[in-house]
Image: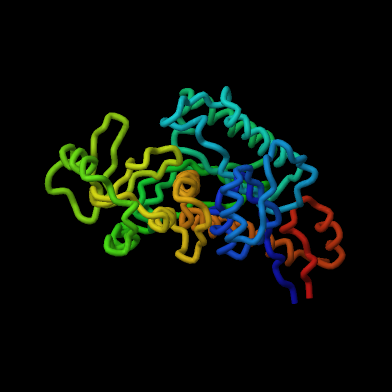
């Protein structure tokens, strides 16, 4: 009898572990994590029992464990429409090349990269084409798409670019929208149970009320854009790490609580909060949406397991065991034959 070997992944630019949660939900094991922010490390340790290693630019690819899947939500500020859009001229943009080096050295079977929607259009599309060309030159077959968190069970409009790569030309499709709109009321806490510190002053409330259109929905999250215009929506606009405290306001009267912010990104209520609100806001704004990652992970794992099963059913399995173990693709290992 044969059994499939558990797939493994590494969690780069790990933040507070949104990608990790998504892949662990599919039975994949994390063997390495990296995150330089000290507060994010605290949150990560509290929830996963380990402190991620620090700055990835200071870690030799050779020192990273072998793995099947590389995960990286690499810094988006260099490409975001909310920033200066310097792209590869920004040191944060060049962190992509650290990912490239790790892929070149470790040769994992697959990867998932995440960035802002604007990555595709930055510098008239040249930045994205450069990224794809570098990944293809490493021998990966690529799939990419913009997905919206609003389509995957959370009341947050958050469009992000996802790039999936496989070492083999596998059949793969990005997950389809669920087809139902999540309800904001499902993630909001009753005002009576919210700490007074979250409520706006009377003057700020009146300023917001004067700008919003009448007959706004309740519940709603009020969003103030760069021009100072206020929109009251039945879902949240994209959470941002560097936004002002009153960027998003629940029903025009208070800021979202720490738990509500986590729920907007699909984190379970069991997720521990161990840092101040100011840091939690930053962490959630930088995070991925967990249900989106879960859905992508499911499709990726299905594709990889088809190959894994095919390898296990080849003739002369045991004779080929050592050959596969020596390959860089951990998921081809036959060590679990029983």
Residue 233 falls left or right of residue 99:
left
Residue 222 falls left or right of residue 131:
left
State how the image is colored.
rainbow
Residue 27, horizontal then vertical, whole percent: 61, 65
Q: Which residue corresponds to the image point at 74% horizontal and 40% vertical from the top-left?
A: 59
Taking the image as drawn, is residue 180 in sight? Answer: no
Viewer-side residue, 141 vs 260: 260
Q: Quadrant of the N terminus?
A: bottom right
Q: Quadrant of residue 240?
A: top left
Q: Which residue corresponds to the image point at 73% horizontal and 61% vertical from the top-left?
A: 311
Viewer-side residue, 211 vs 24: 211
Q: Quadrant of residue 182?
A: bottom left
Residue 185, horizontal then vertical, whole percent: 28, 61
Viewer-side residue, 282 vs 232: 282
Outermost residue, left side: 214
Residue 189, horizontal then vertical, whole percent: 32, 62
Residue 293, placed above or below residue 3: above
The mark total stands at 0
Taking the image as drawn, is residue 63 in sight? Answer: yes
Residue 316, horizontal then vertical, whole percent: 83, 66
């Amino acid at each position: 009898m044969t059994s499939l070997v558990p797939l493994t992944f590494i969690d780069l630019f790990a933040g507070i572990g949104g990608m990790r949660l998504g892949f662990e939900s599919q039975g994949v094991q994390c063997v390495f994590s990296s995150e330089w922010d000290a507060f994010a490390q605290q949150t990560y340790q509290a929830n996963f029992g380990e402190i991620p290693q620090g700055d990835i630019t200071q870690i030799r690819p050779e020192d990273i464990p072998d793995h099947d899947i590389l995960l990286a939500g690499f810094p988006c500020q260099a490409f975001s429409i909310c920033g200066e859009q310097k792209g590869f001229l920004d040191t944060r943009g060049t962190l992509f090349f650290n990912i490239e080096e790790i892929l070149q050295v470790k040769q994992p079977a697959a990867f998932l990269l995440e960035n802002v929607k604007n990555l595709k259009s930055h510098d008239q599309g040249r930045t994205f084409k450069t990224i794809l060309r570098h990944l293809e030159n490493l021998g990966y077959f690529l799939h990419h798409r913009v997905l919206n968190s609003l389509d995957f069970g959370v009341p947050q409009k958050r469009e992000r670019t996802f790039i999936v790569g496989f070492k083999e030309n596998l059949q793969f499709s990005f997950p389809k929208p669920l087809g139902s709109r999540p309800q904001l009321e499902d993630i909001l806490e009753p005002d009576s149970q919210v700490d007074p510190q979250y409520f706006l002053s009377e003057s700020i409330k009146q300023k917001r009320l004067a700008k919003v259109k009448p007959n706004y929905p309740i519940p709603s999250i009020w969003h103030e854009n760069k021009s100072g215009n206020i929109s009251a929506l039945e879902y949240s606009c994209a959470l941002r790490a560097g936004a002002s405290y009153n960027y998003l306001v629940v029903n025009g009267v208070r800021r979202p609580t720490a738990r509500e912010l986590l729920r907007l990104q699909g984190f379970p209520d069991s997720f521990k909060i161990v840092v101040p609100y100011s840091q939690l806001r930053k962490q959630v704004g930088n995070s991925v949406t967990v249900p989106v990652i879960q859905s992508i992970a499911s499709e990726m794992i299905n594709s990889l397991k088809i190959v894994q099963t095919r390898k296990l059913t080849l003739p002369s399995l045991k004779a080929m065991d050592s050959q596969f173990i020596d390959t860089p693709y951990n998921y081809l290992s036959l060590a679990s034959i029983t």
